[in-house]
Image: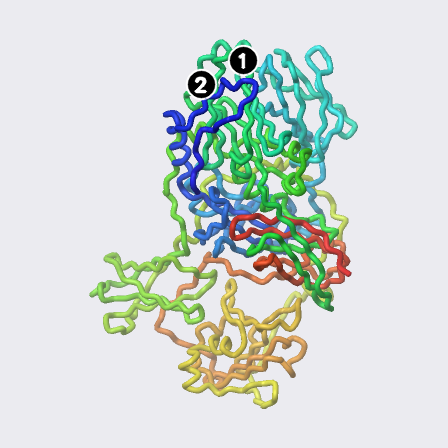
Amino acid sequence: MKNRIFIVFIFAFLFSNAVKAQNPLNESQEKMTKTINNYFGLDRENIFLHLNKSTYLSHEDIWFKGYIIEKKTLKPYTKTSNVFVSLFDENGNKLKNSLYYAENSTFSGNLKLDDNYKTGVYYVQVYTNYMNNFTENESSIYKINIINPAEKNSIDTKKINYNSVTVEFFPESGTFLEGTSNTIAVKIADCNNNPIPVSNAEVFDSKGTLITAFSTNEFGFGRFEIKSTNNEIYKAVLVINNKKIEKTLPKPSTKGIAFSVNNYTLPNKVSINVKTNSATLNEIKNDTYTLVFQKNDTPLFLELSFKNEKTEQSFILNNDLFLSGINTIILADKNFTKVGERNIYIPSQNKNTLDLSILKKEQDSISISGFSNVPFSEMSISVLPNETISEASEKNILNSLEFDNVLENTVRNTSYYITDSNRKKQMELDNVMITQKSKYDWANLMTSPPPTEKFDFDMGIAIKGTVGSSVSNKDETKIKMNSIILGINEFANLNEQNEFYFDNFIVQEATMLNFTMLNSKGDVANTKMSFQLLKNNRDFLKPLEIKQNNLCVTKEPSTIDIPLSGDPNAKKLDNLKISSTVKKEEIVSNTHSRKTEITDTDIDTYVDVLRYIQGNGYDVGVSGSSVFIKARVPSTFKGSRSPQVYIDGTPETDFNRLNNMSLRDIKEIIINKKGFGGGDNSSNGIIKIFTKKGETGNALNLKSNAQTFTIKNGFMPTDRFKNSYSDYKSEGFKKYGTIHWIPKVFTDETGSFRFSIPNFGQESVKIIIEGISSDGRLISEIRTLQIP
């Protein structure tokens, strides 16, 4: 980003002689500029994780989509590839840590939960190894709830706990100064950070005289002003839940400098009032101060002093001098020491709109069309029952990538303040800004050395191998790594320590790789190898900061029937034995099946069974620890896409046996894509494989000279969303279920897009949409859609 570093030519009113307006930077400002530029010299990734909801049952998966931007440009960051997603319990114990592959600034996946997880509060953290280079915590953390149905209880962290009311006071710019007027912001919440609004609070001085009154908005934020502050103790009296509460304000300072900011009264203007008192004036009237307006690596300076012996200096600036989003204002003395701090929000001029409508309703699906004024964007969509109490996380893409990446604490309900913004909402948001501090501590920024690249910017994972025996002619020896199903065929050299490396590979969890050692003639040399996986398990070095007061979390008996996954009519069997006799299948030609006797041409063309199946109309790959085969056109919206597969007449419950199965060992294959004659479970087709060894009843036993290494803790596969509920009419599904999760939806050049959801007979749905455009415009919408 091109830096906009300059001294502002200010229109100043009342005290224009207090501004030293000049074009070139002075020595102090040049030093501050260089320090700030160096501190933000490295790229910084920020990641927003769109969770499909906020409350999960212990047998469900957490489905998510990740969006990555670079902090300074605020645009999608395409360099990131290795992203870690961790799950923590309420005490900060790590339960899971998985690696996901990001491509073109986004990634998606799911975290599988465990039936042993207890009902309670949990945390999801997303980070990269490169984030370890920074003093500040650049990771993103999301609070979720997990309910274990077996415990027969529930948790509701959104229910206000009136026994833990906190009332906090925040003097503007951090200084409550005697002898001046002071603006005090107020935040009222419970121990779960749930807002508690009040309508009539009063402020009294030490003699019991009423000084002023205030109220808060629905989110618990408000402000009041003490016009002439004395050196005494003030207190606020509130009534919350029919209970009188008294809270003492901090004691005013006898000396100091404070400043106030207003960016909502005058259109597109920011007014600033810097003030001191008479007791301080004589000590500072010969000193020079600087207001630094800073966002990331972009500083702006305004120099001032009190040489005219006035206790207040006031200025007006145009909004276009600032960058959109959060800007931090620091008042610094001649030694760069912070005197006061204040954050303001400058709204973007881009107004995003989004419309949804029902396109078509069918028996098993509902097609929805949409339009956004943000073309060429990528979005993720969570569809929940309209009655849900498990709607999306308190963090959306707006507060994650515009607020949380700059501020010390999370700003909630940002959509309310930004959508259809007016003067009232701007003032309410400004109340929130008074309570916030920048994530980037000014003293640390000015005095600490800039971050350096001590931690790698990982791109893929690496495999380090060691050959167990001595090898002559190392220069002429190659190690071959291959996987037919993944199309990998790579070579590496041996070093003096008999080691070899394969780097920057995107290899999924449970993938099987084959390794062979070849001499100068290309002949295979039999030797044992050991393997080590690198870059696949990076720790985040900063501890998880849990600000949740877990003593505030209460579990209550659940009154909602929560159906478990699976067929509601199925019965659980304690023991199940399956026996079968391999019988040569009689091959019957019909118009629905295609019988193929494997020829040398087939072997040369496809090499192995999986490639043959892929070449005959199915999608083939590796998902998790299993090989998958899926019909390219699903037979039903809700059902599986996997065909029935038989080897020598025996049904295969998984397809792992087909991995690396050579066509040379196969006599014939019958592919029945329609599945006619196979019963209700064959709608995605039937594949029957007959091996040459199957004729004699021998088990298939393929030998290979290669040494196999199975990837553990590799990149997690991208699974297709599966619903964990069986009864879509139940109260449990309506409160906690997910109708559908769609991680990838794109708008075209006109902003149009389409998607489909299952038809469960719902009358209305809640649709949560998050997304980003190629130029960094953010999309965040929650809509209720009526189903005709």
Q: Which residue is mark 2?
A: 288
| Amino acid identity at mark 2 | Thr
Q: Residue at x 71, y 36 (%)?
A: 160
Residue 297, image quadrant? top left
Does 164 appear above or below 622?
above
Q: Residue at x 27, y 74 (%)?
A: 523
In this rendering, position of residue 456 left or right of residue 232: left
Does 126 appear above or below 250?
below
In primary-sequence order, the first of circles 2 and 1 is: 2
Q: Which residue is mark 1?
A: 310
Who is closer to the viewer here, 399 or 532? Answer: 399
Does 672 appear above or below 25?
below
Percent of width and height locating residue 561: 75, 54
Give the mark count: 2
Q: Residue furthest left?
A: 473
| Amino acid identity at mark 1 | Lys
Are circles 2 and 1 on residues that touch, CB within 8 Å?
A: no
Mark 2 closeness class: few <14, some 14–19, many ≥20 residues within 10 Å: some
C-alpha distance separating marks 2 and 1:
14 Å
Percent of width and height locating residue 460: 41, 56
| Quadrant holding the C terminus | bottom right
Percent of width and height locating residue 671: 55, 82
| Quadrant holding the N terminus | top left
Q: Element type at marker 1?
A: loop
